[in-house]
Image: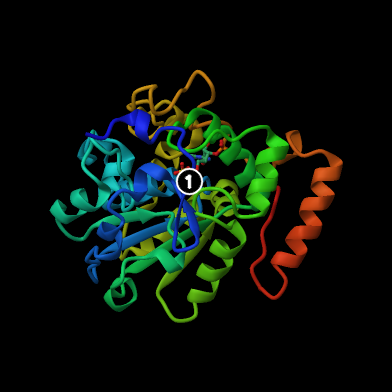
């Protein structure tokens, strides 16, 4: 019988060359064999890029902006995470998805190489959300202090090194964001940026609405903007991770809905770290047309 002590704060496990959250690696076959469907809508992100935010936007669009129609369950179930698993306690993400009626909203942080085998042939639409690397590092570091599924992050300088070398769950941010950017050429992908949603939420929510093939009036869009603001989501138990026990997520250490801004990295990076990061970034991102804003 598996218990949380067997996987909480466990080191990552390498799956086909990628570091993965240990608890999620149980029975990995379930991910490879997962049957994707043509009407699945995928939300794909590197961790800490705005997954919960865009999940809530998608769920509200699906329900015409009506909170009463939304299921009172965690956002990770309404837009079900493919690879999630709390062994011995909760059904695995794949099992939930198999029971879900279509069209399903599926979320994942998986890099392209780890997708289910029939992902591309199933041709499901993809919403990809990317956030600038420096804010992702800071958000990831704070999350790992409170998220017991991941290894202890160590100090910020230590975590920064691990991030730059791709030695964090789900691997290299650089590879993730650029490889999905390239895939835009031959797959229906709406590629969004956290900073754009922050700067102009209604414009970006409208893009999601159009991509999902919905028609909502201006008043409904305004309501969705309000209901997915950082302040509203911070107090919503179904999106702020407070519905999970502190054994898994310890909100006394840090909140899941922490700051929700662009540019917080300036409070963490030293001048020397910033210079080193920028030089390394330049090398790793050479050759891509993908551009980020680290502040707005
Ligand atoms: S996870 O664990 O990978 O699914 O995390 P993810 O949801 O991708 O990212 C969490 C960060 O997104 C911020 N967030 C928001 N920012 C602005 N507005 C809204 N509504 C919002 N919802 C979530 C959240 O605060 C995390 O960022 P940080 O920088 O840590 O605050």
Percent across and percent down for residue 56 are 37, 44
Decide which of 60, 103 is in the foreground and name it: 103
Query: Could you tell me which quadrant the N terminus lies in?
Result: top left
- 181 shown above or below 226: below
* 162 or 195: nearer the viewer: 162
**Residue 220 in view in this figure:** no
Q: Which residue lies furthest to the bottom in this view?
A: 186
Query: In front: 145, or 214?
Result: 145
Q: Label 1, on which residue?
A: 12
Q: In this view, does 186 lie above or below 162?
A: below
On the rendered structure, is 279 left or right of 42?
Answer: right
Look at the picture and state if 117 lies above or below 257: below
**Quarter of the image where one finds residue 246:** top left
Q: In this view, does 92 lie to the left or right of 232?
A: left
Residue 295: x, y in percent? Answer: 71, 47
Q: Is residue 60 visible?
A: yes
Give the structural element (helix, strand or loop) at label 1. Answer: loop
């Amino acid at each position: 019988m598996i218990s949380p002590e067997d996987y909480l704060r466990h080191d990552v496990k390498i799956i086909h060359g990628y570091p993965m959250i240990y608890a999620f690696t149980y029975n990995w076959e379930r991910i490879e064999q997962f049957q994707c469907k043509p009407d699945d809508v995928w939300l794909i992100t590197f961790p800490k890029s705005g997954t919960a935010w865009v999940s809530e936007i998608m769920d509200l669009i699906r329900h015409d902006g009506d909170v009463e129609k939304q299921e009172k369950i965690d956002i990770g179930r309404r837009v079900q995470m493919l690879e999630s698993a709390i062994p011995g306690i909760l059904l695995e993400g794949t099992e939930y998805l198999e029971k879900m009626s279509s069209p399903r909203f599926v979320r994942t942080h998986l890099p392209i190489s780890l997708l289910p085998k029939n992902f591309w042939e199933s041709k499901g639409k993809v919403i990809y959300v990317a956030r600038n690397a420096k804010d992702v590092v800071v958000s990831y570091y704070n999350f790992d202090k409170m998220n017991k599924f991941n290894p202890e992050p160590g100090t910020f300088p230590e975590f920064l090194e691990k991030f730059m070398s791709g030695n964090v769950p789900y691997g290299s941010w650089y590879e993730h964001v650029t490889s999905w950017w390239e895939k835009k050429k031959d797959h229906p992908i709406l590629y969004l940026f956290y900073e754009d949603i922050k700067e102009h939420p209604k414009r970006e929510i409208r893009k999601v609405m159009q991509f999902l093939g919905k028609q909502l009036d201006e008043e409904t869009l305004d309501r969705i903007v309000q209901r997915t603001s950082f302040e509203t989501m911070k107090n919503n138990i179904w999106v702020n991770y407070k519905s999970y026990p502190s054994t898994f997520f310890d909100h006394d250490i840090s909140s899941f809905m922490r700051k929700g801004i662009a540019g917080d990295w300036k409070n963490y990076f030293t001048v020397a770290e910033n210079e080193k990061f920028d030089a390394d970034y330049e090398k790793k991102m050479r050759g891509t047309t993908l551009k980020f804003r680290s502040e707005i």
